[in-house]
Amino acid sequence: MNIRQFRPIFFETDLFNYLSAITLVVCLSNFASHSAQAGIVDLTLFGETTGATNENAFGLSSGDQVGLKATFDYSVLSGSGLEAISFAQGTGNNLSLFMGDLTFTSNNSIGFGLGFPMISFFDGVFTGIDYFAFSGLGGSPALLFSHDYNWLGLNFDNTTASLQGATGHWDPTSQKIATADIPEPGPLVLAGIGLIGAWVASKRRKTLNT
């Protein structure tokens, strides 16, 4: 039996029908999972450096821009009154602070078991962030502390034996919220469509032959 003879016979077997049903269920599950993540958003926000010493580990100068990016489920917010989103371990939410030469993430944060780091909102608009972390990136260890709109970064310069730092504030008016990029189950969906299409075609052939 050659391939051309085997193909229509295979499409009419119980095994093919079983594989088609399994693929359809998996595709529907992926679609449902994707739909359930529709509330996941990316929040971006910027701030300004208002003061900095010459040898700070962040490489920041006065007037430099800093950035914040957070990915979380926005649907848990009602958009009314004072609310907060936690980025502590186990929440599934992600947070990154781009401070010149250094990047701090929610994994760097020292949470003290209080649900920190945390971003607060009032009527859906950013009102501040509570974040405290150390980073060993870029040389000497650096500390970043942010409460409400303000932030403070410090490090000890071993060369000059002096405390260096930078200060600044976040700009709530720069807040932007966009739907997060969620990977599509493309290959699996295409495979499912192919199997289902072949199954429908085989059913049609059987109907025409009766």
Image (cartoon, rainbow, N blue to C red):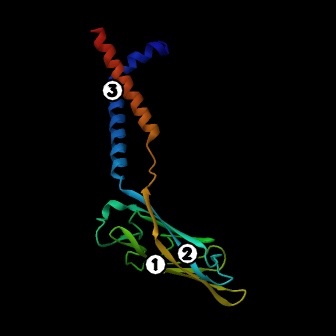
Check the image and report above or below for 92 versus 34: below
Which numbered disc flags the more N-terminal residue, 1 or 2? 2
Which residue matches tag 1? 149
Check the image and report above or below for 165 versus 94: below
The crowd level at tag 2 (other Cα within 10 Å; few <14, some 14-19, many 20+) is many
Q: Residue at x 61, y 80 (%)?
A: 141
The crowd level at tag 1 (other Cα within 10 Å; few <14, some 14-19, many 20+) is some
Can I make out residue 98 in this image? no
Amino acid type, residue under disc 2 in the picture: Glu
Instruction: Report x, y in % for residue 125.
Output: 38, 69
Disc 1/disc 2 C-alpha distance (Å)? 11 Å
Which residue matches tag 2? 48
Instruction: Report x, y in % for residue 102.
Output: 60, 72
Which residue matches tag 3? 17
Amino acid type, residue under disc 3 in the picture: Asn
Q: Residue at x 37, y 35 (%)?
A: 23
